[in-house]
Amino acid sequence: MEFGWTLAQQRLRSEAEDVARDAAQRYGPHPDSWISAYSKAFAKEMAARGWIGLSWPSSAGGGGRPGIERMIIAEALIRAGAPLGAFWFADRQIGPSLIAFGTDEQRDRFLPPILAGDHTWCIGMSEPDAGSDVASLRIRATRSGDTWVIRGQKIWTSFAALADYCYLICRTSEEGPPHAGISEIIVPMDADGIDVRPIRDMAGGSHFCEVFFNDVEVPAANLVGQEGAAFKQTMRQLEHERGGIDRLVSNARLYELARARADVTDPLIRQEIARLESTFRIGRLLVYREALGQAPQGFSAATKCYCTAYEQAVADFVGRVFGPHAVLGGDLARGIAYAPAYTIMGGTSGVLHNVIGERILGLPR
């Protein structure tokens, strides 16, 4: 299927591509730039354009524009490798979560600095013994008067070392089934008792962090939504995280380099390129369907599984095309080394296959 883009959308895509090329020249192109490249200066530039909170409702200070426009801009920026890390999580899911579940005071306090590109957020979700299974997390927040006292550990928390706030998923009660007793609390990252330890990965990055909460005290008013009943809130937040264009084009620039180098006189290479191109187009349709609100509830799990498997296939293709040159360092080596993370972060494909079977297909447990 070929979309018939409106003239306004075509102009927006052209503008976004110009901005993306300029950003890549000034800040350097980065594979996986939404999670591996950080620039507060570029965040301020995006805010000045109104490209942070673009699809948030205007009543919350956002642009009130269709989600497909955000996807058009994001695809151009990520393809070029523009540094999005300073605002990506806040724009993608923190803002929508606060709009959906936060109090008026929380929205008035936290949304404007996000929209201005001033505040970076991290998301405290995974734990050493609770990765993709959110219901098994153990970090505890205990109410003491007008204060929450938080004890425990998070891991794989991207940009925790640079963030101003953490959107923390924690346990406030042990009663009931595993998915009960979970709450979401906003934690300032400069609070006493927080210890952040960056994790250097095999690709040379250090955006992932361990975060230790040692009797960290935050106001009770920082609770988002309903105490002990935030599991559904978290699942809704993950809908924003899993079904976006970032799960499809993270290593697009490396694919373009390999595509230009590939020996297309080899019929097997041509066949592989055709398979990758076809897979990309299907993945793009899945992402657009999410942005247009046409996907069934929970279908972002399927979108993520499909798109991140494609990204791993791209990394394999890049490695075969460049051969030994791909392991000599630089973006090629980093992209290949980082590829296993695609189907892990944001929910492992194994766990999401269960989600697809149980929640979308209605298969028995």
Image (cartoon, rainbow, N blue to C red):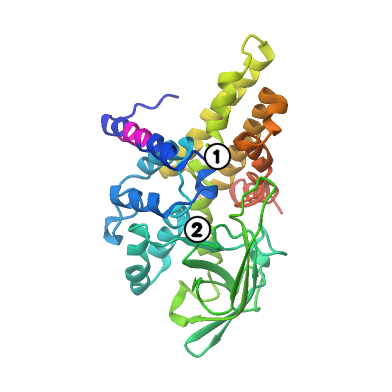
Q: Is residue 242 left or right of residue 153?
A: left
Q: Nearer the viewer, residue 207 or 10?
A: 207
For badge 1, the amino acid type reads Pro
Query: Is residue 207 shown above or below 275?
Result: below
| Label 2 SS | helix
For badge 2, the amino acid type reads Gln
Question: Which residue corresponds to the image point at 51% horizontal and 67% vertical from the top-left?
Answer: 166
Residue 21 is labelled as none
Residue 210: image x %, image y %?
64, 64
Per the image, the residue denoted by label 2 is: 237
Residue 54 shows up from this direction: no
Question: Which residue corresponds to the image point at 33% horizontal and 72% vertical from the top-left?
Answer: 104
Q: Residue furthest bottom?
A: 145
Q: Is residue 101 left or right of residue 141?
A: left
Of badges 1 and 2, nearer the viewer stands 1
Q: CA distance from mark 1 to mark 2?
A: 25 Å
**Which part of the image, by quadrant, shows the C terminus?**
bottom right
Q: Which residues are magenta?
A: 12-18
**First reached walking from the N terminus: tag 1 or tag 2:** 1
Question: Which residue corresponds to the image point at 69% horizontal and 15% vertical from the top-left?
Answer: 268
Residue 185: image x %, image y %?
50, 72
Most common SS among magenta residues: helix
Per the image, the residue denoted by label 1 is: 31
